[in-house]
Image: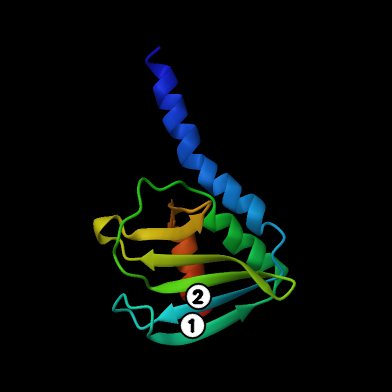
Amino acid sequence: MFFIPIIVIITSCNKAGKQLKERIVNADSIAINFFKGDGTMDSVEVVKIIRDRKIIDQLTGLITAKSHTGVARCGFDGSIHVFKMNMVIQDVDFSIKEAGGCNQFTFLLNGKYNATSVTDEAKELLEGLKSK
């Protein structure tokens, strides 16, 4: 009986990531806005458009890979706009600050804010794309 609530918690945390993955699996391009770094969204420094299928698959896989407990309000380092047939199908904000649990991707799904963790691999990919 003790294990049933734990299983429900684990599966519900991962449910948002799975739903997001189903939604963005067939994306054909991604636009990434990198913000100035002070957490405000109206300070875009760099914009990168990604059309390379390998990078799209890698990034979408990293966005949905690891559940995050709760949604921390820390400001953002950037935003990702996922496109399919020239239409935005999903917006994802990200913070790559490690202090205070702020290393997260956040997104609105079914009217609710959700978060997944920004892994070291995801952080390296985003920083590499920014500097290209």
> Real-space Cα distance between discs 1 and 2?
5 Å
Left or right of residue 78: residue 86: right
Vertical order, 10 against 72 (above or below)? above
Residue pointed to by mark 2: 128
Image label count: 2
State the residue lying farthest toward the front: 111
Vertical order, 36 against 104 (above or below)? below
Local SS, label 2: helix
The residue under the point 44% across, 56% down is: 119
Q: What x and y, as percent, mark residue 12?
A: 48, 36
The reply to whether the C-beta atoms of the residues labelled 1 and 2 are less than 8 Å apart is yes
Q: Which mark is residue 131?
A: 1
Specify the quadrant of the image occupied by residue 24.
bottom right
Type of the residue with mark 1? Ser
Q: What x and y, as percent, mark residue 121?
A: 48, 60
**Disc 2 packing (10 Å; few <14; some 14–19; many ≥20):** few
Type of the residue with mark 2? Gly
Local SS, label 1: helix
